[in-house]
Image (cartoon, coloured by chain):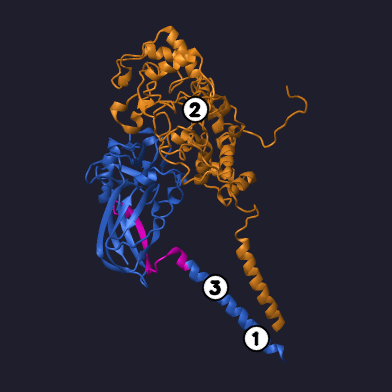
């Protein structure tokens, strides 16, 4: 008779011990990352790549640029980095560098301090520091094929395809827009405003940013496939194209 | 029944502890790298940046980098390693080849530069295209006329090799094989290649004296060469046009990187260290001997080129005795202890030595 209650006690003891152990484990894990206890929410950022008012479909769809030249797209990749939501300094994006690839992934999450926001700022491209810091990993891993091996630097924006207007070999169009050195830097800050939105708590917020390729060909500068079907070097042409970057992006919706 | 609950509870707890501890062990033993202290030779300047700050130099990382450097499997056809075109006995240049051979019977476009004292070199390649020692290998690894391999294929090949898995674990803490780790390991090897023990260095340290020829040559060097090939590295790592004729190869050099017309035909000033074994010379390997190089500066500089270095506008007038003296001096820059150091070679963990066959 005696060992029955003892056994119950024993089980209770083990369960309590396990529970305590888990508590300590969870608390230490939670605190090891954030020294200051800040309530964070999550912002999911989606990029909607469009051309001629339709979502970009690789390979098969044919689009027409403002100069009336037809083209298709086989590859569309660009870097988004250094994201911040102005008005709140405590935002931390642990990854900081994100590769948007129309063939793979066009969205990602970032942690955001709970609060109200009405604009987002990011860099299209990779800042010069990371262009000069040796071998990188994650989105910046050179296996992602966004890195020039013959002349150090990241390709910030890459679009490839074909166009009957192109004079290059196999009617290809290739735009590898990059350059980080002073005078040739094409990484461009994008600022987008939106109606004030509360982020945090039970309010997971999703933002949809449109990247409208029609503006790639014509906003600040006009670009014709028949004249410049290829740009694979840092320099004047890359800068001319990058001058159109701010017009590419707009807020589509937030929910 | 209750005993069973008790047993399974204990079993669960033991198992959970076991799993937590086991998750840290992949069967390759503990991670205990041996740090290496990168030594700056006495009297040398500090490197412009410490390449080992974010890439901690360890014996295990160095050995992994050495293996990768000498591994032909990194190339598309399995034959060409970094060491194929950077041979130790040629101070890690390509011996006797103006241009090097890549996969599929291709030629490189420029002469493979010697590799040593790279920790002091801020910009790599003849045109300074590469801004960090870690990412330099990406160019030869992937170029169609060098090793011609795709980076992802290369990583898959390395991943299949269990010896590499062990070495990545001992160098980096786990057996994950990524481009970053490959590049960091290679940088530990190439960044460790220091050549600072030539006859010249021994003279500087007071261990030996120069012959009269060598001393006269040294004096001539100080007057005529040192403004670009500055001591103790024997280069100032600037980009200059030394007036090579443009009739054979029109390589625009530094202009390709800066797009500045003033940089046309400029190339990085190479170090004169180990010059005796790094022939042929110049960015395209067009000159085959040291006396012929000196001849270029005496009489063959094309002074009509607008981007010619101002220091060379009047060429460098030397008589034949001075040319001989200068040649003797340049040969004092050969560092045979570097050229023969087994630590840098392709190596073999097993060293065979026949008993009684020593001299």
Residue A196 found in image quarter? bottom left
Q: Which residues are magenta?
A: A30-54
User: From the viewer's perspective, is B358 left or right of A125?
Assistant: right
Q: Alpha-carbon neighbours of circle 3 within 10 Å: few (<14), some, or many (≥20)?
A: few
* Visual hue assigned to chain B: orange
Alpha-carbon span between mark 2 and mark 1: 76 Å
Q: Is residue A184 left or right of residue B337?
A: left
Marks 3/1: CA–CA distance:
21 Å
B82 up-or-down from A130: above or below: above
Considering only vertical position in the picture, is B315 above or below B355?
Answer: above
Residue at the (46%, 16%) spot, across then down: B215
Residue underneath mark 1: A8
Residue A36 counted in the magenta span: yes
| Percent position of residue B335, x then y | 54, 25
Do marks 3 and 2 both belong to one polypeptide chain?
Answer: no
Dot 2 falls on which chain?
A: B
Query: Residue placed at 31% from the left, 27% from the top?
Result: B263
Which numbered tag is attached to residue B114? 2
Labelled pair 3, 1 in contact (Cβ < 8 Å)? no
The mark nearer the N terminus, 3 or 1, is 1
Numbered mark located on residue A156 in the image? none
- Give the chain coloured blue: A
In the rendered image, residue B44, in percent from the top left (x then y), is placed at 45, 32
The answer to if B297 sits in the magenta stretch is no
Q: Residues within 10 Å of mark 2 (few under 14, many from 20)?
A: many
List the residue tagged with mark 3.
Answer: A22
Category of crowding for the residue at label 1, using alpha-carbon neighbours closer than 10 angstroms: few (below 14), some (14–19), many (at least 20): few
Give the structural element (helix, strand or loop) at label 2: loop
Q: Position of residue A226 (x, y in %)?
A: 28, 36
Q: Secondary structure at mark 1?
A: helix
């Amino acid at each position: 008779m005696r060992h029955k209650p003892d056994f119950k006690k024993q089980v209770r003891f083990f369960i309590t011990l396990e529970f305590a152990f888990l508590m300590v484990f969870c608390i230490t894990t939670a605190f090891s990352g954030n020294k200051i206890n800040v309530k964070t929410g999550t912002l999911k950022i989606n990029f909607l790549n469009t051309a001629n008012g339709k979502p970009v479909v690789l390979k098969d769809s044919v689009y027409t640029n403002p100069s009336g030249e037809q083209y298709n797209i086989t590859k569309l990749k660009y870097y988004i980095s250094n994201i911040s939501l102005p008005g709140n300094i405590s935002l931390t994006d642990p990854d900081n560098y994100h590769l948007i690839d129309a063939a793979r992934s066009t969205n990602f999450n970032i942690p955001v301090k709970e609060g109200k926001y009405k604009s987002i700022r990011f860099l299209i491209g990779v800042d010069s520091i990371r262009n000069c810091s040796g071998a990188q990993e994650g989105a910046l891993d050179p296996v992602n094929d966004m890195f020039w091996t013959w002349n150090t630097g990241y390709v910030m924006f890459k679009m490839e395809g074909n166009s009957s207007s192109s004079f290059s070999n196999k009617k290809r169009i290739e735009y590898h827009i990059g350059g980080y050195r002073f005078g040739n830097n094409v990484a461009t800050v994008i600022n987008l405003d939106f109606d004030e939105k509360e982020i945090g708590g039970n309010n997971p917020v999703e933002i949809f940013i449109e990247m409208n390729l029609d503006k790639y060909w014509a906003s600040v500068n006009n670009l014709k496939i028949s004249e410049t079907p290829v740009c694979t070097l840092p320099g004047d042409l890359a800068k001319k194209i990058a001058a159109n970057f701010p017009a590419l992006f707009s807020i589509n919706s937030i929910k | 029944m209750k005993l069973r609950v008790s047993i399974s509870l204990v079993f669960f707890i033991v198992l959970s502890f076991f799993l937590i501890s086991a998750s840290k062990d992949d069967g390759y033993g503990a991670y205990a790298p041996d740090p290496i202290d990168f030594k700056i030779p006495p009297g040398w300047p500090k490197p412009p940046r410490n390449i080992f700050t974010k890439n901690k130099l360890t014996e295990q990382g160095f050995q992994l980098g050495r293996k990768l450097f000498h591994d032909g499997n990194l190339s598309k056809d399995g034959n060409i390693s970094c060491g194929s075109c950077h041979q130790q006995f040629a101070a890690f240049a390509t011996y006797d080849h103006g241009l090097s051979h890549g996969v599929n019977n291709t030629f490189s476009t420029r002469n493979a530069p010697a590799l040593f004292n790279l920790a002091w070199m801020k910009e790599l390649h003849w045109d300074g295209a590469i801004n960090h020692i870690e990412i330099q290998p990406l160019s030869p690894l992937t170029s169609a006329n060098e090793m011609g391999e795709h980076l992802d294929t290369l990583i898959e090949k390395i991943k299949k090799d269990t010896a590499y898995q062990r070495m990545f674990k001992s160098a980096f803490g786990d057996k994950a094989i990524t481009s970053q780790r490959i590049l960091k390991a290679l940088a530990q090897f190439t960044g460790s290649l220091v050549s600072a023990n030539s006859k010249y260095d021994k003279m500087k340290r007071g261990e030996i004296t120069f012959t009269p020829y060598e001393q006269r040559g040294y004096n001539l060097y100080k007057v005529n060469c040192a403004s670009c090939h500055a001591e103790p590295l024997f280069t100032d790592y600037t980009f200059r046009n030394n007036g090579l004729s443009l009739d054979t190869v029109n390589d625009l050099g530094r202009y390709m990187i800066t797009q500045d017309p003033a940089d046309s035909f400029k190339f990085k000033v190479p170090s004169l260290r180990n010059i005796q074994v790094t022939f042929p010379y110049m960015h395209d390997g067009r000159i085959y001997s040291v006396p012929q190089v000196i001849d270029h500066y005496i009489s063959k500089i094309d002074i009509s080129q607008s981007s010619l270095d101002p220091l060379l506008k009047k060429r460098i007038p030397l008589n034949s005795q001075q040319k001989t003296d200068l040649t003797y001096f340049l040969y004092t820059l050969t560092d045979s202890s570097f050229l023969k150091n087994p630590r840098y070679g392709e190596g073999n963990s097993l060293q065979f030595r026949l008993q009684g066959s020593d001299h």
